[in-house]
Amino acid sequence: MSKRDYYDVLGVSKGASADEIKKGFRRKAKELHPDRNTDNPDAEAQFKEANEAYDVLRDAEKKAAYDRFGHAAFENGMGGAGARPGGGFGQGDFSSAFSDVFDDLFGDFMGGQRGGGGGRRAARGSDLRYNLRVTLEEAFSGLQKTISVPAAVACSACDGTGAEGGVEPTTCPTCSGMGKVRAQQGFFTVERTCPTCSGLGQIIKNPCKVCGGAGRVEKERALSVNIPAGVETGTRIRLAGEGEAGMRGGPPGDLYIFVEVSDHKLFERDSVNLYCRVPVSMAKAALGGSIEVPTIDGGRGRVQIPAGSQSGRQMRLRGKGMPALRGGGIGDMFIELAVETPVNLTSRQKELLKEFDDLGEDNHPESKSFFSSVKSFWDGMKG
Ligand SMILES: [Zn+2]
Ligand SMILES: [Zn+2]
């Protein structure tokens, strides 16, 4: 692989002056900057090549060696003090060379980003989060809710410009409208938000008295929100453009409504299905019959209990669950029986139950099978 001529790499002639070499490198560095070459995989390698060339040609000693011997000057340890073996891409050199061109690059990129705005620098407003607690009934039916949102809105006195009497803001003298200032930190040039204009790039000589120059004021806003049926805890509803107003006429942020559905006394929810635990008397569970149950729409449902139902038995009421948030039908409601042992018996009731028990022979198949297992377990231990 033959190395390209360093002068060619920088696009300058052999007799180029130090200044021309510097300009050539800056031109290349701009062309090959990673921000501008996101889909050019060769850019990085080319930038390294340019950096290596510049590293040699800007140094009088190295340049003289290169002019005499070409690339051979830096091979096999030849070339004298300071010359690195071929390849020559060191992090330290990269940084210093890069910071050298950064000043130009920044100005350029900032200008590019700001283009079209006519010099006015406006910042997008923040997104807002609003926590909304709804009942399960509301989640079932959906609802229209008026919420009060504390938000910054565009100042009406100055039309959001922040300037008294509609006087246009002027370019910030500290940062020349960049919104950022640069500081040297070792090899690196770092950018900071301009302290004079807080990054807006503009200052207002005569700030609006109502908003103090911000172009927006704090205000409670009443907002009517449509909460669709089927929302769950964790559902987020985005209201585009309903967030905080932007700074000095910038676009507003969005408002996010975070839904939380309260627990319900009767129903437990699992996605679109509802569960309701219904106590039934021992007698009813034994004899069978129908029970009335509540439904989430506020109505009543009837469920048939088969004779001999045990505690924990589930019955389904189709279509009595929750609606799915984005269409897709409605869930079911499950009734779980909880057979209740009677308490506070009168002496008459006790009598009847004793009599019932004496008559009972084959009424408890589960007990019968359990105790037969217990017996064989004990028998097994003896053996
Ligand atoms: Zn500034
Ligand atoms: Zn104002």
Image (cartoon, rainbow, N blue to C red):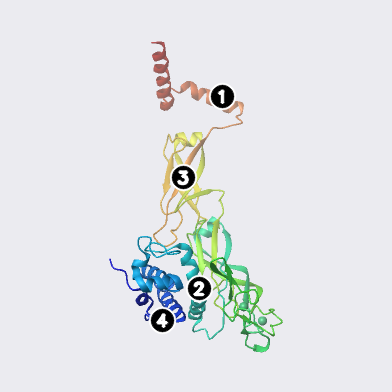
Q: Earlier in the sequence, mark 1 or mark 2?
A: 2
- Rendering quadrant holding ligand 1: bottom right
Q: In which quarter of the image is residue 257?
A: bottom right
Q: Which amino acid does label 4 sit on?
A: Ala
- Please give the label number shown on residue 100: 2
Q: Quadrant of the N terminus?
A: bottom left
Mark 1 vs mark 3: give the one in front.
3
Q: Earlier in the sequence, mark 2 or mark 4?
A: 4
Q: Earlier in the sequence, mark 1 or mark 3?
A: 3
Residue situated in front as seen by the camera: 152 or 40: 40
> In 3D space, how far apart are the residues under numbered discs 1 and 3 (Cα atoms)?
33 Å
Residue 116 visible from this viewpoint: yes
Q: Quadrant of the C terminus?
A: top left
Q: Which amino acid does label 1 sit on?
A: Glu
Mark 2 surroundings: few (<14), some (14-19) or many (≥20) residues within 10 A: some
Mark 2 vs mark 3: give the one in front.
2
Residue corresponding to mark 3: 335
Mark 3 surroundings: few (<14), some (14-19) or many (≥20) residues within 10 A: many
> In 3D space, how far apart are the residues under numbered discs 1 and 2 (Cα atoms)?
103 Å
Residue situated in front as seen by the camera: 78 or 352: 78
Q: In which quarter of the image is residue 314?
A: top left
Residue situated in front as seen by the camera: 375 or 247: 247
> In 3D space, how far apart are the residues under numbered discs 2 and 3 (Cα atoms)?
75 Å
Residue corresponding to mark 4: 16
